[in-house]
Image (cartoon, rainbow, N blue to C red):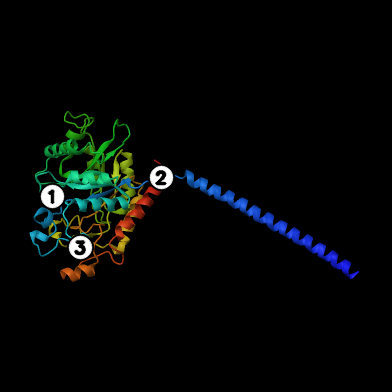
Amino acid sequence: MFVLVKRLLLIKMKKIQIAFLTTFALSVLYYLLSSRSRRNIDESALEFEPSITLPNDKVHIFYDAFYRNEKTDKAFLNWYKNGSEKILNTRYYPELDLYSSNNPAVVDLHMKQIRNAGVGVVVVSWWPNDHPNSPPMLLILNRAQKYGLKVTIHVQNYPDRTLTNLMKNIKNVLDTYGNHSAFYLLKVPKQKRPLPLIYIYESLAIKPSSWNQALDPSSKYTIRNTKYDALFIGLIIQETDRYLVANSDFDGYYTMLSLSDHTYASTWYYWPYIQDFARDHNLIFIPTISPGYDYRMSKKNMDPLLIPPLVSRDFGGYYDRAWFRAIVSKSKFIAINSFNGWLAGTQIEPALPSEDVNEKLKRNYEDYAPGTGEEYLLKTRKWVIEFSNRSLYRSP
């Protein structure tokens, strides 16, 4: 009797074990199948999500190519204050030392750094060929092409600039470099071909009525619908400047002096309204951001009504806030002032740590602490990706 009961209990236990194992196996199989199904859904969603392509040609960066040194050019230019070789014209010290913009290795590295930061268009500060600051355009274009970048010009207010010689100079630039594959062209609605986009600094120094002669399609002197047609982007500072630029037959405007709350155009709060005005008038708005500003070494050359001598970087916080406000303005473009504006302290190019420079030159310099020398290049890439992400889902 005892043996029979034991057998019955063993049989019952085996059935329970089998049932448990069966249930467990079915549960595992269900989990694997369901998780596989969920994973396939996720992968499918990712597969159809628009990808970000860098560099982004809607992000522009101002680039100075007027630096000269003794090794390459037999003399320094723009690095030292008032021609002196004792006091540098910058509060920071470049990681590449006091380089020459005519040095191919320097330009090559600059283009590589800009490319790695995700920026797509290099906006070169431009002066005529007979000016000491005239940039090496062909060198820059060739190196930009190597890294998949585009290049355009930022026409400065050079001595004796008039509408006549300005247009002559622009035509010469387009004749000389316009067919280079790295020269920036932008597709625009209702145009048969992509057009160059050209920045004009202090554009309102020339009267709107004069600009009309060149940019009004009905003028007999117009460049519109000719081989020299281009998108002209003028500088705005005050609130009324956007009306003046529009009345000058420009194609858009930029702010350049990105010093929050100092002028109307540089105040981040107004950027969405400036963008709305641009949209309503079929204009391009390019808000300009900056990591900060430090012109204390050259403030005698500046207009105090426009630019204070110092805007703190706030350990990178100022740059972050400027990027955020530019993105939420819903502009389709953003410009950065600047890659290497050492004279104004707006550069994001790598700088040496102050301790290293102070020991070498016996003078106090600024740096990007607590970040590294590449702090602002890394920040730029992060924000370019953020801007590109939002642009993917932004309605026209």
Q: Return the x and y of residue 108 as percentages of the image width and height.
A: 23, 50
**Element under label 2?**
helix
Q: Earlier in the sequence, mark 1 or mark 3?
A: 3
At horizontal 24% and vertical 61% (from top left) the residue drawn is: 351
Nearest to viewer (mark 1 / mark 2): 1
Q: Is residue 38 left or right of residue 237?
A: right
The three-letter code of the residue at mark 3 reads Tyr
Residue marked by disc 1: 133
Mark 3 and mark 2 in contact (Cβ < 8 Å)?
Answer: no
Q: Is residue 84 left or right of residue 381?
A: left
**Element under label 3?**
loop
Quadrant of residue 258 within the rendered picture: bottom left
Quadrant of residue 86 within the rendered picture: bottom left
Inter-mark Cα distance, 1 to 2: 39 Å
Q: Is residue 94 left or right of residue 186?
A: left
Residue pushed farthest front? 3
